[in-house]
Amino acid sequence: MLYFCVVQTKPIITVKDLQKSYGDFHAVKGISFEVYNGEIFGLLGPNGAGKTTTLEIIETLREKSGGTVIVDGLNIDSQANDIKQIIGVQLQAAGYYPSLSLTELLELFAGLYNMPINTLEMLSRVGLEDKAKAKFKELSGGQKQRFSIATTLINKPKIIFLDEPTTGLDPQARRNLWDLIREVKAMGTTVVITTHYMDEAEQLCDRVAVMEGGKVIALDTPDTLIDNLVASGFERKKEVKKANLEDVFLSLTGQEWRDE
C-alpha cells in the first residue's frame, strides 16, 4: 500500500533555546528545532539524552526551566490548556483503568474530549476489534501498546506524540503499525516519535533530530545523514544485502495482525 502526503514547510512546533534543569543537573541544554506541519519527525538518542524530557515539555506534561515552545501558534507558557486540545499523547500502561474493557476505555476518553467515536472502527485500525470486550489487564504487552496508539487518535489531533510505540511488538505488528502511522500522516496529522530502532526511524521519519547529553547534535533527513556519513569515508564491515532476517521472517509467516 502506498501513502502520499506533501509535507508542508510551515512549522507547527517551534522550540527555541529549551532548557530543563534539576538542581545542578542539566537534562536539556538550550536546544532549538522546528517540526514541520504534516511530517513524521523523529527524536532519537540513547537513554538519558534528554529526548523524553523534551517531549514531555512540548506535551505540557513537564515544566521547562527556560526557552520558548510554540505549538500551532500557541505559547506553552500561557496556552497549555489550548495545546492539550489539539494534541494526542500516547499513554503508558499505567494510564488506563485495568478492569475496564477496551470499548469502555475508548468511550471514557471520548467523553473527556466530548467527541463521538466508533469504538469498533477505532479498534480495527490497530487490529484489536476482536478484543473489544476484553479488559485492558487481560491484554498482552504488545496489545496494550497497540491500544495506546488508538487512544491518541480519539480527539482527531493535529499532532500526535508516540514514545517508543513499537516496543514489545512482533515483526508483523511492528510493520503494520508503521502502516498505521503512515496513514495518520496521510490524513494531515503531524507525528512526533521517539524510537530506539534506527531502521524504524529510517523508514518512517521525514526528518530526525539526534540528541546526546541534552543537546541536539544532528538534524536532517535520514537519507542526508546517511549520505554524509558515507561521504566521510565510513564503510560497513559487512556488505548490506537486499533483504534482512526480518524480511525473511515476514515472508514466511505473513504480515497480518495477530495475538502476541
Image (tube, grey):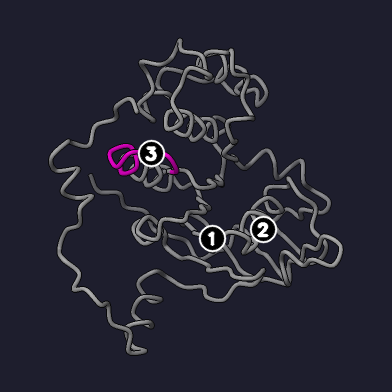
Q: Position of residue 75 (x, y in %)?
A: 76, 55
Question: Could you tell me which secondary element the residue under label 2 belongs to?
Answer: helix
Residue labelled with disc 1: 43
Q: Position of residue 198 (x, y in %)?
A: 40, 60
Q: Are marks 2 and 1 in contact (CB under 8 Å)?
A: yes
Instruction: Work out whether 223 lies above or below 146.
Output: below
* Mark closer to the observer (3, 2): 3
Report which quarter residue 108 is drawn in. Answer: top right
Instruction: Give the residues drawn in magenta, as a range.
Output: 167-175
Instruction: Work out whether 52 lies above or below 107.
Output: below
Apparent side of residue 151 relative to residue 31 in the rendered image (left or right): left
Q: Position of residue 179 (x, y in %)?
A: 33, 43
- Label 2 sits on what residue type? Thr
Q: Which of the image's four quarters has the N terminus?
A: top left
Q: Are marks 3 and 1 in contact (CB under 8 Å)?
A: no
Q: Which of the image's four quarters has the C terminus?
A: top left
Which circle marks residue 169 in the picture?
A: 3
Instruction: Work out whether 100 lies above or below 208.
Output: above
Sequence-first tag of 3 and 1: 1
